[in-house]
Image (cartoon, rainbow, N blue to C red):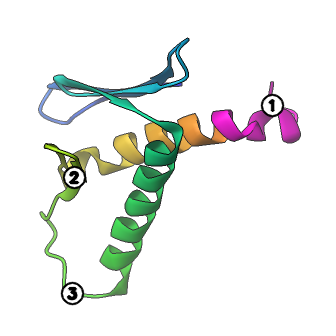
């Protein structure tokens, strides 16, 4: 469930999600690692979808507005440049948790 991407400026940004043996998910993004429950991971996926759809809907979002996710006392700010990588990492983790690769024969 890893997604790595190099930015145009040569800076290496990482984003991936790992499922821990305790059942929690570890979301790694830039310099942070956040431990999440399954339901929170699903909610982040929903927020990514809403943020992406709001950008397609109209001019209310400027081209440089970041995705901001509040997780208790922690805020993750995902710049638009990193959004695809972040969203893909979250979606891949949710798909794997739901067993979707096995359903479509991608195991």
Q: Could you tell me which secondary element the residue under label 1 belongs to?
A: loop
Residue range in magenta is 96-107
User: As rendered, which of 48 and 21 lies closer to the eye?
Assistant: 21
Q: Which badge, 2 or 3, is on the more N-terminal residue?
A: 3
Determine whether label 1 and label 2 are within 8 Å by CB: no
The dot on residue 7 is: none
Q: Percent from the top left, x then y, of residue 94?
A: 58, 41
Vertical position of residue 52 compared to residue 68: above or below: below
Residue found at x 20% / y 56%: 68
Q: Which of marks 1 and 2 is in front?
A: 2
Q: Could you tell me which secondary element the residue under label 3 belongs to?
A: loop
Cα separation between marks 2 and 3: 24 Å
Q: Which of marks 2 and 3 is in front?
A: 2
The reply to whether residue 4 is visible in this rendering is no
Residue found at x 80% / y 24%: 107
Vertical position of residue 20 compared to residue 8: above or below: above
* Residue named by callout 1: 106
Asked if the magenta segment contains residue 16, the reply would be no
* Residue named by callout 3: 59
* Residue named by callout 2: 70
Asked if the magenta segment contains residue 106, the reply would be yes
Q: Which badge, 1 or 3, is on the more N-terminal residue?
A: 3
Determine whether label 2 and label 3 are within 8 Å by CB: no
Classify mark 2: residues with Cα within 10 Å, few (<14), some (14-19) or many (20+).
few
- The quadrant where residue 48 appears: bottom left
- The quadrant where residue 98 appears: top right
Q: Percent from the top left, x then y, of residue 49?
A: 45, 64
């Amino acid at each position: 469930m890893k997604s790595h991407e190099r930015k145009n400026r040569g800076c290496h940004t990482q984003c991936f999600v790992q499922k821990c043996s305790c059942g929690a998910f570890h979301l790694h993004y830039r310099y942070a690692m956040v431990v999440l429950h399954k339901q929170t991971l699903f909610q982040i996926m929903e927020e990514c979808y809403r943020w992406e759809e709001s950008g397609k809907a109209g001019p209310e979002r400027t081209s440089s507005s970041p995705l901001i996710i509040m997780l208790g006392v922690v805020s993750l700010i995902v710049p638009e440049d990193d959004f695809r990588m972040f969203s893909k990492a979250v979606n891949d983790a949710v798909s794997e948790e739901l067993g979707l690769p096995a359903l479509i024969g991608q195991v």
